[in-house]
Image: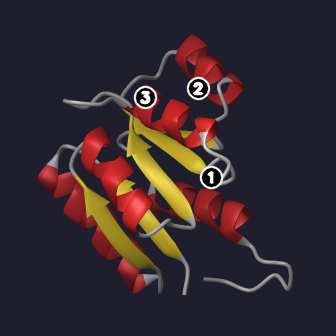
Amino acid sequence: MKTILVVENDPALRMLTSQLLELEGYKVIQAENGRLALEAIAAEPPDLVLCDLLMPELNGWEVLRQLMRSPETANIPLVFLTASAAPSEREACLSEGASGFIIKPFQHAELLQTIRSLLVGPAGSQP
């Protein structure tokens, strides 16, 4: 079973996203900010991180930078979920190493398609 870390400071959105992913067969870990996300990753590295861009304590940019610095976490795909629809923001995120960029509010199908494309194993199995 693939594990996804959902990092979102809005409790309702974090819970709804987590429930959607659990219904799809993923194991979900939750964190409400970047600092807690990095602690969760250190304790149990997920297969993928869904991360809000703007959060208190440690924002999504810093989470991405910390992941990219460590050989143990550099290959964990990180997909930003953000309300920022600016094309320049999307380009900057992807050029910094993010694996995806989804604008909130998002469609469930878009989120699931992005996750599946990043988590397909060598045999093409899911989740």
For mark 2, what is the residue?
93
Q: Amino acid at mark 2?
A: Cys
**25 or 1: nearer the eye?**
1
Q: Amino acid at mark 1?
A: Pro
* Residue 24 picture location, percent across and down: 47, 82
Quadrant where the C terminus sits is: bottom right
Which residue: 37% across, 81% down?
A: 22
Residue 47, quarter of picture: bottom right
Mark found first going from the N terminus, 2 or 3: 3
- Judged left or right of residue 38, residue 65 is right
Q: Residues within 10 Å of mark 2 (few under 14, many from 20)?
A: many
User: Tag 2's secondary structure?
Assistant: helix
Q: Is residue 109 visible?
A: yes
Residue under label 3, please give it: 62
Would you place residue 14 above or below residue 112 in this image?
above
- Callout 1 crowding tier (Cα within 10 Å): few <14, some 14–19, many ≥20: many
Q: Quick one: which residue is furthest to the left in this view?
A: 11
